[in-house]
Image (spheres, helix red, strand yellow):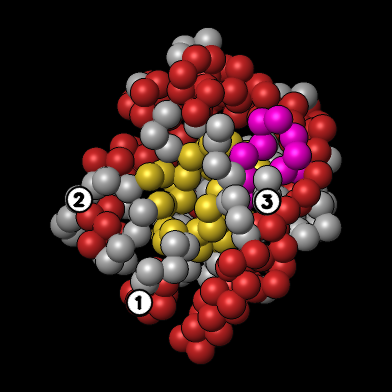
Amino acid sequence: MRQPLVAGNWKMNGSLDSVTALIEGIQAGLDTVSTAEMAVCPPFVYIPRVAGLLEGSGISLGAQDVNDQESGAHTGEVAPGMLTDIGCRYVIVGHSERRSIYGESDEFTARKFAAARKAGLVPILCVGETLEEREEGVTEQVVARQLDAVIDLEGIGAIGECVIAYEPVWAIGTGKTATPDQAQEVHAFIRGKLATLDTDVADKVRILYGGSMNPGNAADLLAMADIDGGLIGGASLKPEDFLDIGRAGNA
Ligand code: 13P
């Protein structure tokens, strides 16, 4: 049985005051979330503050990105070991905003994935197609290519120790969610593809859905056989909405 994971990707939002209020709000209702693991991924600078607030709460902590190098002359970058040092368990790699706005390739994403694992982090590997790619009918090829870059570098075994997030780019921040069937179709494709290489890995890896997930659609998405949680943007900034999504995963 795969425990659902509901992870908040706060993106470039917040202040010391607002992240404190957000964590306090989530903690106040956390006892109503009985099944899902909850995680938050604050902007780098707020991670130490959030780590302090989360102590003993059972909420997991992650970062939104990481560099592929261990240390050195990389102005402005953050190394994987720094994230474990300040208490992170997860790190998002290959988010579509990194790929599209900052031009990060499949190969660079794979190197970040490898570096994160080496430092003891659990990567949350994002994959997903643009609207143009969906309309061209190449969704599966795109997702397969993004996964293969990581499998080629790290091997299929590494996939069993990470989390995958399917985030159709056209659904991110647009209010346009994939239907449960549309999402399930791609999740099943991903699991099926992994199963051709290793059935144990395919069975155990958690595949999250991301893209305008909210309290209104979470239960239907999470009810699908191959959707094991959510990577939540906008709705993770509101404690009640984030908790509602967590509760949607209650068994
Ligand atoms: P939204 O939930 O705001 O659509 O963002 C999804 C996302 O990109 C999570 O990583």
Q: CA distance from mark 3 to mark 2?
A: 39 Å
Magenta part of the protein: which range?
Answer: 221-231
The residue under label 3 is 250
* Residue occupied by mark 1: 52
Q: Point out residue 169 in the picture as x, y percentages from the top left corner.
A: 68, 46
Q: Is residue 86 visible?
A: yes
The quadrant in which residue 167 appears is: top right
Which residue is label 2 attached to?
70
Front-most of residues 111 and 61 = 61
Give the vertical position of 182 relative to 58 (above or below): above
| SS label for mark 2 | loop
Is residue 167 among what the camera can see?
Answer: no
Label 1 SS: helix
Dot 1: few (<14), some (14–19), or many (≥20) neighbours within 10 Å? few
The image shows residue 58, relative to residue 150, as above or below, that is below
Disc 1 residue type (three-letter): Gly
- Disc 3 on helix, strand or loop? loop
User: Given the image, on which type of amino acid does mark 2 rest?
Assistant: Glu
* Drawn side of residue 179 relative to residue 207, left or right: right
Task: Check the image and report above or below for 64 versus 27.
Answer: above
Residue 185: x percent and y percent? Answer: 74, 27
Mark closest to the chain's N terminus, 3 or 1:
1
Please check the rendered image and state whether residue 58 is part of the magenta-colored stretch, yes or no: no
Q: In terms of sequence position, does the residue under pointer 3 or pointer 2 come before the other?
A: 2
Is 229 one of the magenta-colored residues? yes
Left or right: 217 in relation to 126: right
In terms of sequence position, does the residue under pointer 1 or pointer 2 come before the other?
A: 1
Q: Determine crowd level at label 2: few under 14, some 14-19, many 20+ residues with C-alpha closer than 10 A.
A: some
Give whichever of 34, 191 is nearer the camera.
34
